[in-house]
């Protein structure tokens, strides 16, 4: 607030001086000029009356001539002083209004408000740098899941968009360059409750700078970054950025996974999509020769994946410098029928429309489909606003870089163990994936399941820890208890981590110990109930053992005489 | 030499000298203290206050504070004077004059602090 007050005072110097000067001049004249009262005696106004008179004339109220009628000389001076003081007031008021309207002043006020909000933050929060397509998706999803978020973006229009968004909790936003360390500090980089920084601006250099700043100023804070080139990615990884998303490489890997094992691909899609959305359909891209239109970052990543599977590619690229050094490559835009025919469209199985222009990608898609209706088409959608037309064009797979980044980051922030699970799942085969998929389908009711983590410790699951002290509990018993309680759907255990060692898809006989971490998936409703049950000792004990132990001192003392037969019995 | 500094020093010194001139004289004798002089002291003090606006240094803050103290004391003196002349039925007497002059003397102290601060600041600059 200091800065704003000083700015205000400094700018008020001239208007206030003008006001003091005008009052002094007008008042001095009134004090000096003599008047004649009704008895013919000469009188002069005193200071009190001058001030009173000026107060009501200068503010255009006007009460008349006091204490006696004025002489003509006084009236002449009064006329002059009225104009003088009114102009002085108008000038001062105009200055104040202009100052309040001034962008610098407004910005200073906004900055102060933001600073106050951040300092008074009571809950843990994330800092999101960049509020573009990715940033806005991320903010919306995080807020919906009950996280607090702080946004920095240098474009004021985007911040206006944020203010118009209908979000459940208030999101403090700062207009400024997030790569400047002072802005990050104001946004709460060193705040005790800051949980992490997400750098998703569309500028690789800015993201890099943010990552470095965070690692230098608050080394323990996790930082998640978006990178568009391999070199930036390596650079970020070199100083310990916790998680880096490169949408093009990630998509290349995903498409390769889909080609290699559709089951594993679908599993990954289901577990990383936004919960409660419709389940993604299975995709089975055919193996064979593909046409890659556009050989930028995406084209190269996809080509690399296909090469590793021994598939052939034909590249169509407009810019000669980016031509594919090994393998067939045509020069052209890929939107005309003859280029596509030259590439042998009749004999290939799939096509990637992966340039950075949405119109070109759509045009390429439609031309290709007219030439070969059986073609498997992957289209890249660069801008959020084009969602409708891409939906209408019906490519087999749509690649949306901003959405992919948002999903990946969200999965990483909300359940860090999920990334480990997905990594480990790559070593499993397609049958394992298909079996798991059918189990998930049975519990989710056609929507994307929620994946949640259970830390078996005093803080997150006090009831379970207490029950484990009394008797061993198996995973199956725990899940059956949830299932029986209020008759909800069941959930599927994905992984158990004990002392750093992971066990994929643990069976019902797996035992649970204090200190374990469980990764589960199921409907979001079930997740809530599950968390609730883990805190309710009575309910959990009853559901697991079938024995309702009396609680409270009187009942416990009473029941001690008749030892319960149910103790030690596992369900 | 900058004109702004001259202006600044001029008003701060003038506030002190006028204030001193007003206080000078027999303590409770209304004949020794002129109302117009008090008016001049108030106006010059106001100008000095406005000139001190917007300085973020420690000295600047102290200067502004001393000026605000002087303004407050002088306003109180002016209000007492107005009350004595226009509202009090007995008119101006020695008791009223004494409180007016003592208030103005308080303002004089604040103005002395102002001038001393300005001098200290200037001396430090020379080093």
Image: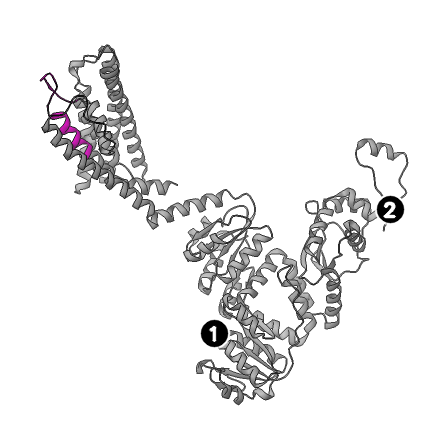
Q: Residue at x 70, y 63 (%)?
A: A446
Q: Which residue is mark 1?
A: A357
Question: Taking B80 as reference, is A458 above or below it?
Answer: below
Q: Quadrant of residue A417?
A: bottom right
Pointer 2 chain: A
Q: In this rendered view, identify the residue nearer to me: A164 or B6.
A: A164
Which colour scheme appears in the figure?
Answer: one colour
Q: Quadrant of the N terminus of chain A?
A: top left
Q: In this rendered view, identify the residue nearer to me: A193 or A528.
A: A528
- Horizontal placement of A387 versus A453: left or right? left
Where in the figure is residue A358, as x and y percent of width and height?
49, 73
Where in the figure is residue A479, as x and y percent of width and height?
78, 54
Question: Taking A261 as reference, is A198 above or below it?
Answer: above
Find out whether residue A464 is within the magenta segment. no
- Between tags 2 and 1, which lies in front? 1
Q: Residue at x 80, y 58 (%)?
A: A508
Give SS at disc 2: loop
Find out whether residue A24 is within the magenta segment. yes
Mark 1: give few (<14), some (14-19) or many (20+) Cα within 10 Å: some
* Residue B39 appears in the rendering: yes
- Give the magenta part as a residue range: A22-45
- Horizontal placement of A371 versus A544: left or right? left
Give SS at disc 1: loop
Q: Which residue is mark 2?
A: A568
């Amino acid at each position: 607030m200091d800065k704003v007050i000083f700015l205000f005072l400094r700018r008020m110097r001239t208007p206030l001086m003008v006001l003091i000067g005008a009052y002094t001049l007008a008042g001095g004249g009134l004090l000096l000029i003599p008047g004649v009262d009704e008895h013919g005696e000469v009188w002069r106004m005193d200071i009190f009356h001058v001030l009173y008179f000026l107060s009501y004339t200068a503010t255009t109220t006007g009460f008349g001539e006091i204490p006696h009628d004025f002489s003509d000389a006084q009236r002449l001076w009064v006329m002059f002083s009225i104009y003088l003081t009114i102009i002085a007031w108008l000038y001062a008021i105009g200055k104040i209004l202009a100052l309040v309207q001034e962008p610098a002043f407004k910005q200073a006020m906004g900055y102060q408000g933001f600073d106050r909000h951040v300092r008074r933050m009571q809950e843990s929060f994330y800092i999101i740098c960049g509020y573009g397509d990715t940033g806005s998706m991320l903010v919306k999803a995080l807020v919906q899941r009950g996280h607090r978020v702080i946004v920095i973006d240098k474009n004021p229009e985007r911040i206006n968009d944020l203010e118009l968004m209908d979000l459940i909790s208030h999101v403090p936003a700062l207009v400024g360059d997030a790569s400047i360390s002072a802005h990050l500090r104001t946004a709460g980089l060193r705040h005790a409750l800051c949980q992490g920084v997400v750098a998703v601006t569309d500028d690789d250099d800015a993201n890099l700078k943010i990552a470095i700043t965070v690692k230098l100023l608050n080394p323990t804070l996790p930082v998640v970054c978006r990178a568009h080139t391999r070199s930036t990615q390596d650079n970020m990884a070199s100083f310990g950025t916790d998680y880096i998303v490169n949408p093009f490489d990630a998509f290349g890997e995903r498409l390769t996974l889909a080609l290699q094992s559709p089951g594993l691909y679908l599993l990954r899609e289901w577990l990383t999509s936004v919960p409660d959305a419709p389940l993604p359909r299975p995709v089975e891209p055919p193996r064979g020769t593909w046409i890659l239109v556009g050989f930028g970052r995406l084209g190269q990543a996809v080509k690399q994946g296909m090469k590793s599977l021994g598939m052939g590619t034909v590249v169509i690229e407009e810019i000669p410098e980016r031509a594919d050094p090994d393998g067939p490559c045509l020069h052209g835009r890929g939107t005309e029928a003859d280029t596509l025919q030259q590439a042998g469209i009749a004999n290939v199985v799939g096509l990637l429309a992966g340039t950075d222009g949405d119109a070109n990608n759509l045009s390429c898609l439609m031309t290709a489909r007219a030439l070969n209706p059986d073609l498997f088409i992957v289209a890249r959608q660069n801008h959020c606003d084009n969602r409708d037309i891409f939906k209408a064009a019906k490519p087999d797979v749509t690649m949306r870089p901003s959405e992919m980044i948002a999903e990946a980051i969200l999965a990483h922030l909300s359940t860090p163990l999920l990334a480990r699970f997905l990594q480990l799942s790559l070593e499993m085969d397609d049958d394992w994936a298909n079996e798991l998929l059918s189990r998930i389908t049975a519990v989710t009711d056609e929507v994307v399941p929620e994946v949640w983590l259970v830390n078996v410790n005093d803080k997150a699951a006090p009831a379970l820890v207490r029950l484990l002290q009394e008797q061993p509990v198996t995973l199956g018993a725990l899940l059956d208890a949830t299932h029986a309680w209020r008759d909800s759907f069941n959930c599927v255990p994905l992984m158990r981590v004990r002392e750093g060692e992971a066990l994929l898809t643990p069976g019902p006989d797996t035992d649970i110990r204090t200190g374990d971490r469980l990764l589960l998936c199921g409907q979001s409703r079930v997740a809530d109930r599950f968390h609730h049950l883990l805190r309710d000792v009575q309910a959990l004990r009853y559901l697991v053992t079938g024995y309702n132990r009396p609680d409270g001192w009187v009942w416990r003392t009473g029941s001690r005489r008749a030892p319960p037969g149910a103790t030690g019995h596992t369900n | 030499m900058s004109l702004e500094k001259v202006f600044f020093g001029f008003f701060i010194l003038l506030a002190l000298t006028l204030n001193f001139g007003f206080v000078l004289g027999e303590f409770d004798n209304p004949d020794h203290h002129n109302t117009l002089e008090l008016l001049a002291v108030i106006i010059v003090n106001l100008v000095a206050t406005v000139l001190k606006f917007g300085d973020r240094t420690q000295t600047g803050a102290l200067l502004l504070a001393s000026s605000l103290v002087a303004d407050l004391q002088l306003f109180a003196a002016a209000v007492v004077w107005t009350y004595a002349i226009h509202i009090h039925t007995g008119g101006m007497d020695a008791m009223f004059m004494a409180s007016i002059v003592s208030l103005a003397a308080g303002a004089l102290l604040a103005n002395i602090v102002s001038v001393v601060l300005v001098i200290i600041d200037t001396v430090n600059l020379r080093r």
